[in-house]
Image (cartoon, helix red, strand yellow):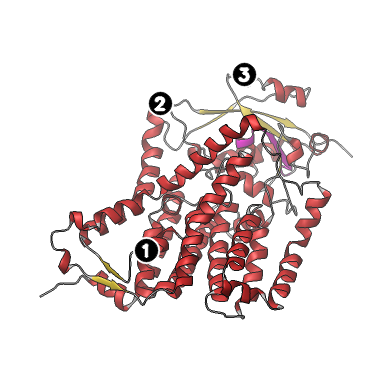
């Protein structure tokens, strides 16, 4: 008698339930881990919130939507960072469930579950994803665009045009590389007969009108800021280095698929003794257009993104790794055939769970053990204590809430998250924060901070030059989450008192 596990039976009978369980469990994992281990926001999240607090139509960081949403989530959570962590996980949930809906329309519900499970092992999706920003917000918008693009081209559902236009406009308000992704969708539509028929109506014109209305304020800002230009093309002598850079980015994308590759190898006949007894996941035949759609958006965004990033020397794949690799799991399922045998089922479950849990284990290990090697864990800075100390110090000295902060970009960004939400001035690059100048800072007052290298708190030469007459205070020290072998965090600071009008 053939035994079939409960998980396989649930995949066959209740595929939607399995999808909800796994995506909610992963979201809960990456919501709890930063709340327990992060004393300060990861990466550039503090800067994202400082920019979002100003509600600028556009900045040098790109379109405004991610920054506005981050600030709204932060304020809605009572000025606590967990609101932004929750927003990031909502993006993850929408991404994976939308991918499930798209996969179900192509390969059926049972194999759609496998597509989602495979995609979750891709490093970009199994890793933290708590650093909310343009690349994180772009993932659900790109997934929704692909879903409604398939409903338009593959299923001929004209009602999807309105949702498609909204998502396209929001993606353009999320990151500059959205233009590249939209061009890929347009290219696929033009290259297929069904796609050309979809475009031969007035619906695309109305959709274009909606997109223009959504992005019009940002377009006006681009024109006024003279930022509506492409980065300069490289010289001929630099083409070799740029090509190598693009190849390295593409190599990273391939390396991120190692989890899928391992699962495919373990499910092959090489490691199976009783392959004929393996449970089978069935699907209806996939139409030719569906195969081309899946393969196109599994391969071309990665190649085009790596090419553009190499050409213009970008530090990440244009459009983000999430957009480039979103369809990778579904592409593997489509290529696997109508019947998928799940051999070595217990081993597959363990390896999949390990791929999901490994990034969280790495974060815990780094936070606990890295300080003992004299390494600095940026998320171990006590952001709340730092912001509270400098905010209270300024208020006691001047009887006013802290209006602005500048100096060291990392420390100033953390203080900008304080209760008073002071304005951030990037001292090294003040043109990036046009809402505040050094003259306005000196007039309204604020706090200047830097990493102190001595007990006197002598400011760095550059800060002393920008703020002549600065009188440093006694440096303030703070504990890390785990002190280990690293010295205490010593922050030099000075108060610029507000001037009478």
**Residue 475 in the image, given as x and y percentages of width and height:** 60, 26
Q: Report the Cα–Cα distance between label 2 and label 1.
A: 51 Å
Whether residues under marks 1 and 3 lie with C-beta atoms below 8 angstroms apart, the answer is no
Question: What residue do we see at 54% from left, 54% from top?
Answer: 136
Residue in the foreground of this view, choosing between 292 and 477: 292
Q: Is residue 11 left or right of residue 298?
A: left
Q: Which secondary structure, mark 1? A: helix
Among the 4 quarters of the image, the one containing residue 498:
top right
Q: Report the Cα–Cα distance between label 2 and label 3.
A: 23 Å
Q: Report the Cα–Cα distance between label 1 and label 3.
A: 66 Å
**Residue 149 in the image, given as x and y percentages of width and height:** 57, 70
Q: How many marks?
A: 3
Q: Which secondary structure, mark 2? A: loop
Q: Nearer the viewer, mark 1 or mark 3?
A: 1
Query: Could you tell me which quadrant the N terminus lies in?
Result: bottom left
Q: Where residue 456 is drawn, which disc sits there?
A: 3
Q: Nearer the viewer, mark 2 or mark 1?
A: 1
Residue 206 lies in the magenta stretch: no
Q: Which residues are magenta?
A: 401-410
Q: Where residue 230 is drawn, which disc sits there?
A: none
């Amino acid at each position: 008698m053939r035994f079939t596990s409960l998980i396989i039976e649930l995949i066959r009978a209740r595929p939607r339930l399995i999808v909800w369980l796994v995506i909610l469990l992963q979201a809960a994992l990456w919501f709890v881990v930063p709340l327990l281990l992060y004393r300060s926001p990861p990466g550039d999240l503090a800067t994202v919130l400082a920019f979002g607090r100003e509600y600028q139509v556009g900045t040098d960081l790109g379109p405004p939507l991610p920054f506005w949403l981050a600030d709204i989530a932060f304020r809605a959570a009572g000025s606590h960072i967990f609101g932004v962590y929750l927003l990031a996980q909502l993006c993850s949930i929408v991404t994976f469930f939308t991918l499930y809906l798209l996969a179900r329309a192509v390969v059926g519900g049972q194999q759609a579950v496998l597509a989602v499970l495979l995609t979750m092992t891709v490093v970009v999706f199994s890793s933290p994803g708590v650093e909310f920003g343009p690349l994180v917000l772009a993932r659900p918008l790109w997934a929704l665009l692909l879903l409604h693009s398939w409903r338009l081209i593959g299923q001929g559902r004209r009602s999807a045009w309105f949702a498609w236009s909204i998502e396209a406009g929001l993606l353009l308000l999320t990151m500059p590389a959205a233009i590249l992704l939209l061009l890929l969708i347009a290219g696929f539509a033009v290259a297929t007969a069904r796609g050309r028929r979809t475009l031969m109506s007035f619906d695309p014109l109305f959709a274009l009108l909606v997109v223009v209305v959504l992005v019009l304020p940002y377009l006006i800002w681009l024109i006024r800021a003279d930022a509506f230009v492409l980065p300069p093309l490289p010289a001929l002598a630099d083409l070799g280095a740029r090509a190598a850079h693009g190849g390295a980015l593409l190599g990273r994308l391939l390396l991120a698929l190692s989890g899928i590759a391992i699962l495919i190898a373990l499910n092959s006949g090489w490691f199976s003794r009783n392959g004929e007894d393996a449970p089978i996941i069935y699907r209806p035949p996939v139409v030719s257009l569906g195969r081309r759609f899946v393969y196109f958006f599994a391969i071309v965004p990665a190649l085009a993104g790596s090419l553009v990033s190499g050409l213009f020397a970008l530090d990440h794949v244009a459009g983000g790794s999430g957009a480039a690799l979103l369809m990778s799991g579904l592409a593997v399922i489509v290529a696997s055939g109508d019947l998928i045998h799940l051999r070595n089922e217990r081993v597959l479950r363990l390896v999949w769970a390990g791929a999901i849990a490994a990034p969280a284990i790495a974060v815990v290990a780094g936070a606990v053990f890295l300080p003992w090697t004299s390494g600095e864990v940026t998320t171990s800075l006590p952001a709340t204590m730092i912001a509270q100390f400098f905010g209270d110090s300024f208020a006691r000295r001047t009887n006013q809430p802290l209006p602005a902060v500048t100096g060291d970009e990392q420390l100033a960004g953390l203080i900008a998250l304080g209760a008073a939400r002071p304005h951030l001035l990037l001292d090294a690059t003040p043109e990036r924060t046009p809402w505040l100048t050094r003259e306005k800072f000196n007039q309204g007052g604020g706090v200047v901070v830097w990493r102190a290298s001595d007990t006197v708190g002598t400011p760095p030469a550059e800060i002393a030059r920008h703020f002549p007459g600065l009188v440093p205070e006694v440096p303030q020290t703070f504990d890390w989450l785990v002190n280990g072998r690293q010295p205490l965090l010593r922050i030099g600071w000075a108060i610029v008192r507000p001037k009478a009008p």
